[in-house]
Amino acid sequence: MRKLIAALALSLGLGACATYEPVPKEYTGPTASVTDTGTSEDGTKARMFALMAIDGNRINNAFSASANASYGRGASLTTVYPERKVQARPMKVLIRGSHATGAPIHAMASQMAGTFFSVEGTVDFTAEAGRTYEVKGELTKEKSSVWIEDTSTGKPVTAVISK
């Protein structure tokens, strides 16, 4: 019985780590590129802007990649900003702008101090073949916003989610 429970727990744990691949291996159509962005405030806290999901499917993003890179390093935060290919087509995407910290206690302390901001929402996004995009935003006490912009024009190509 213990082996069965252990096997079940392991399979559930590994299944939770699986993320949706925006461009399946067998896909041969046109693609675009989307990169998460951010800035480090210090070695333990950063502002991050990320593409979190495509059409309701969670994908690898700056928050999960940075958490994995920072695992076992105490309060230190190693930031990682993934670039991924996406299919060139209309889609609904979840984008997020938030502070991230190397330790959960630091996040709680920042929230209590009023220096931890976050915003997210789902927007329509049409990726055009061969184009490159970045998830951009701002996080301030007055206003927090997130959007996707075309790197060649520097202009938003999605609605701006603000809080």
Image (cartoon, rainbow, N blue to C red):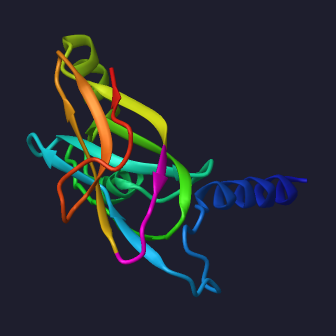
| Membership of 128 in magenta stretch | yes
Q: Residue at x 28, y 47 (%)?
A: 156
Q: Is residue 109 above or below residue 118?
A: above
Q: Position of residue 55 (x, y in %)?
A: 61, 51
**x and y percent of residue 146 in the render?**
31, 37
Query: Which residue does the image show at 27% across and 18% down from the upper left?
Result: 111
Residue that appears at 10% across and 40% down:
41
Residue 129 belongs to the span the image colors magenta: yes
Identify the residue at the far left of this view. Answer: 42
Q: Magenta span covers which residues? A: 124-130
Residue 133 image-quadrant placement: bottom left
Q: How many marks?
A: 0
- Residue at 55 percent of width and 74 percent of height: 23
Is residue 6 left or right of 39 when viewed as pictured?
right
Pick the residue in front: 155 or 144: 155
Q: Quadrant of residue 34?
A: bottom left
Between 88 and 121, the one nearer to me in the picture: 88
Q: Nearer the viewer, residue 106 or 46?
A: 46
